Image (tube, rainbow, N blue to C red):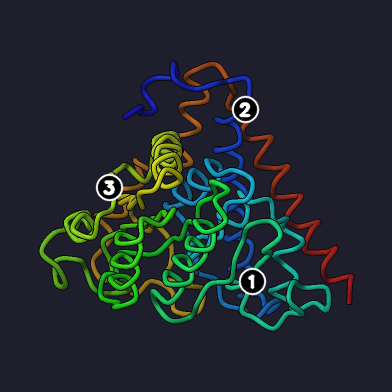
Amino acid sequence: MTSMQSAQDFDHQNGLEWRLYTGMLTTRLFEDALIRWEHEGKISAQTFPSKGQEAIAIGCCLALERGDAVIPSFRTRGAMVAMGITIVEQLREFVHSPLAAGGSRDAPHHASWPERGVMPGSTMIGGHLAMAAGLALAMQLEQKGEVSLAFFGDGTLGSGDLHETMHIAGMSRLPLILVCENNGWEMATPWQKVRKTQSLIPYAEPFGFATRSIDGNDALEVYNAARWARATASNGQPVFLDCMTFRAGLYSSHFGEVRGNVEKDLATWEQRDPLKRMAEWLMGHGLASAEELQRLTRQEEEGIEAAFNTVRSEG
């Protein structure tokens, strides 16, 4: 597995490292702005921030190809960013604009743009995984080499939909990639109270999935693993990626922090922050300076504010 300590296996000319960084940066700044706007009374829709987990959605989606489909979870807004859905398009969902996708009939974290590979999610925990398997079955029948990918949290292990999906996908050898954002918490319950091992791989392997446990806070490792997963799934074996990470942000903008005694864990995981690590990688390999990254942050913040003003002016 390639880690952030080596650049030799990456094509620098395609801007991958910058795309990983900017995707994570945009996601974090956008979610921060959404929470602020809600608290200021400018929007009312709930936000489920992915702070600390952005590398998973960005790394996986940048590894996909044209024709592939993604079903985000309610905490993988980065998937929409990486799949090319603009901030303006996403904001229309939050303000229920008449220009919103699907006539603004769904929650912002369930919005979809099927023509660009972003499919609708499900409010029911794990419910979207069966839909991802259905998409994979259609792709298998069409024989175009496309894959279906779905994100979910480790708390979904308690959902029957996950196990049924793995059974169907394993038996039918569907081109399906299941990506677990394994942050060790089921809302306010730590993993130790609900299962024997933090890793979900022992639960996935018996169903016939190719599996890999990865550092979900290493954007380049996530990307590499997702490229392997895509090649494996398109060749007839479903894949389960267990991405070890930690949610550094709130549970949601409505509920705030629901975990008890996480201060020490937050301080530890702060040192493994995916955005910070990617910035250090870029600077360490001479691809960016601190000044350039600061300028990029200002530009992204200004662009997000401009997008908000654009959407509000649409009526």
Looking at the image, residue 278 sits to the left or right of residue 289; the answer is left
Upstream in sequence: badge 3 or badge 2: 2
Task: Looking at the picture, tell me which residue is in the foreground, 233 or 159.
Answer: 233
Looking at the image, residue 172 sits to the left or right of residue 203; the answer is right
Q: Position of residue 78 (x, y in %)?
A: 55, 54
**Neighbours of disc 1 within 10 Å: few (<14), some (14-19), many (20+):** many
User: Whole-Å distance between the Cαs marked 2 and 1?
Assistant: 28 Å
As drawn, the label of residue 162 is none
**Which mark lies nearer to you, 1 or 3?**
3
Q: Which residue is mark 3?
A: 211
Q: Position of residue 5 (x, y in %)?
A: 36, 22
Where residue 151 sits, quadrant-wise, is bottom left
Which amino acid type corresponds to the residue marked 2 in the rendered image?
Gly
Q: Residue at x 48, y 46 (%)?
A: 60
Screen quadrant of the C terminus: bottom right
**Which mark lies nearer to you, 3 or 2?**
3
Screen quadrant of the N terminus: top left
Q: Residue furthest left?
A: 196
Q: For numbered disc 3, what is the local secondary structure? A: strand
Q: For numbered disc 1, what is the local secondary structure? A: loop
User: Whole-Å distance between the Cαs marked 1 and 3?
Assistant: 29 Å
Which amino acid type corresponds to the residue marked 1 in the rendered image?
Ala
Q: Residue at x 44, y 20 (%)?
A: 9
CB atoms at circles 1 and 3 under 8 Å apart? no
Q: Which residue is mark 2?
A: 15
Q: Which residue is mark 1?
A: 111
- In the displayed structure, 83 sits above or below 171; it is above
Upstream in sequence: badge 1 or badge 3: 1
Q: Residue at x 14, y 72 (%)?
A: 193
Q: For numbered disc 2, what is the local secondary structure? A: loop
Looking at the image, residue 69 sits to the left or right of residue 228; the answer is right
Which amino acid type corresponds to the residue marked 3 in the rendered image?
Thr
